[in-house]
Amino acid sequence: MSRVGRLLAYGTVAAVLGAALAAPVLAPRDPNALGDDPTRDRRLAPSVQHPLGTDDLSRDVYGRLIHGTRVSVSIALIAAALIVAIAFAWGTTAAFAPAWLRGAMMIFADVVYSVPRLLVVLSVLTFTGQLAPATLAVVLGLAGWAPLSRILYRAAVAARRAPSTESAMALGVGRVRIAFSHVLPALRPHLVEGACMAVAVVIPLEAALTYFGIGVPRPTATWGRLLDDAGADPLGAWWLVVFPSAVIAATVMAMNYLASDARAPRLTAEAK
Amino acid sequence: MTSDAGRVQLTIPGALLAVLRPLGRAMLVALLVTSVSFVGLRLLPGDPFAPSPDDPPELAHARAQSRVQFGLDRPISVQYPALLGALARGDLGHSFATAQPVSGIVRSAITNTAILVAPALLIGLALGVALGTWQGAHAGSVRDKILGGATFGYLAVPEFLVALILGGLVAIRWKLLPATGMVGAEVATAPWLVRLPSIVEHAVLPVSVLAMSTACVVARHQRAAVIAAVGEGFVRGAGARGVPAHRILWVHVLRRTAGTICAMAGVLLPALVGGAALVERVFSWPGAGSALVTAVAARDYPVVQALVLMTAVAVALSASLAEAGAQRLAQGEALV
């Protein structure tokens, strides 16, 4: 992995997190506020006053993008944290469980993996009427942990069967110590990779669900909502599509890069 | 090759087991998914035949009748075994919303999705394997880096966004292809063969979007697999025997990576079906995704149940079959 690539990836992550944290400072105006003259200020091209232009309803795209970053990044982080936490708990528990329970736990993971995510989101939507951003984050987290739990399960089984772990067990080292000094280090690259991949998967998913009206409701700004704000003729006003798309693509690229970065040392270690 | 005849016979039970075990596992997963979705759907608030206060008496009566007809008045402990019994007989029941057999609704929805997913999978795999193999053989070259950057960047753009932009340019701005739907209105009721050209025309854009992201994923994995294979001794051996370089790459190395490709295909199918649900929506394609949205909104339990069951079977089956296939290919037994 090149130094430039890593710098770009960390820079993007820092910029996105910074925008999410400092949103009220960077864009003090209400992101849903209309322009001074809603008819005149519709679909204005980028200018000094509106650096990223205005949308169909005369709202400032810069402000909405900054505040949307806050919502989209929160959703992605909550969902990713849930995915990693559940997958870790499930995968490692299964790896150390008796054989019958192990099989049952992995089949349950297959069941969760096989239920279409769209169905889960739609069902919760009929349940609650509208999805708050936090609800959407939890739903995406609960629906997405299965593949990572399988990866962590395999890695934990391999770590448990490693000669060093077995000799430590034979020497009478306690279970807690085994978990922290033998199993956890072997899982760390998978955990980092899984967390980055989870963010890289959840961000486009939130954008798509919100765009299609089954995610975060109007008028809350998220990256998906901004694409929806571009309206029926998205190519008519390029700034309405280009800026949110660029932010989504840059974030996903950075997360994918960090994921492969986490994977790389493991591959070289295996090759040796 | 002469000694192979005996070996093949010996491995038949093993091969059978390798197919039967994933099948059994897929059946079990399907049963559990059905149970989970059954309970989940019944937990949803509201009743498909809930009476409304401003119903005329005859409609209220009809609703009550439908509830009895579909067995919704009975307790779940009776409904659930009845459902399993019906499913075991291959009976998917009747739609709550239209009273038509669910099998027909589900069959057309899944066929429509398959019209997009099957070509996308084949084109994506072929393109991705070709691209990845070429890249792996030229790893580190400028063109490899450009291609690698392009696939990496393309995968970062959400698929529905690519669909929107491509549709906006090709269909709406340049009017080269139809923007939405599956078949032109002028041939909608024509026989199957007459409709085919129109269906192909409508499918070009959604299939391209799905195939492109598949190709990018495949190319990245295939490149890594080829680089790993090129480093192995058999490549140098073949080179020393005077096998031409292009033959080593496209026959020997490609065969070596067959296990990777097989394992990938199993993971790609679920991802494609998920992606298709969104791309279908952009192009108003009447597939499984839109059928699911309609059915959940109408609380049409039998249709939802059947769609979930079919998807779960397809996902579980493709995942476990691909895994079994990859394992056998890795053992080098199934290359005959």
Image (spheres, coloured by chain):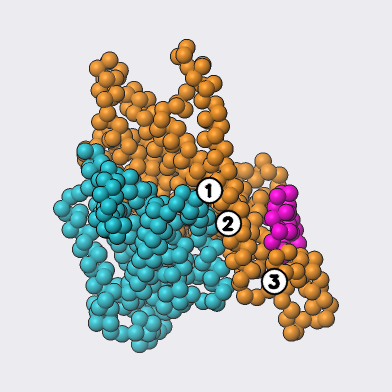
Chain colours: A cyan, B orange
Element carrying mark 1:
helix
Give the spatial CA distance, label 1 vs label 2: 10 Å
Q: Mark 2 or mark 3, which has the lower sequence index?
A: 2
Magenta includes B120?
A: no
Identify the chain of the residue marked 2, using the numbered disc in the image. Answer: B
Foreground residue among B104 and A108: A108
* Residue located 34% across and 28% down the image: B253
Q: Residue furthest left?
A: A3
Separation of residues labelled 3 and 1 (CA atoms): 30 Å
Image location (x, y in percent) of residue A54: 35, 76
Task: Name the spot of residue A200 as percent of width and height, x first.
Answer: 35, 59
Which numbered marker is on residue B316?
A: 1
**What span is colored magenta in the figure?**
B79-105
Residue B184: x and y, percent?
62, 52
Q: Residue B317's x, y, as percent?
A: 54, 45
Front tag of 3 and 1: 1
The front one of A194 and B200 is A194
* Amino acid type shown at disc 1: Ala
- Pointer 1 with pointer 2, Cβ within 8 A: yes
Q: Which mark is residue B33?
A: 2
Horizontally, residue B278 falls left or right of residue A55, namely right
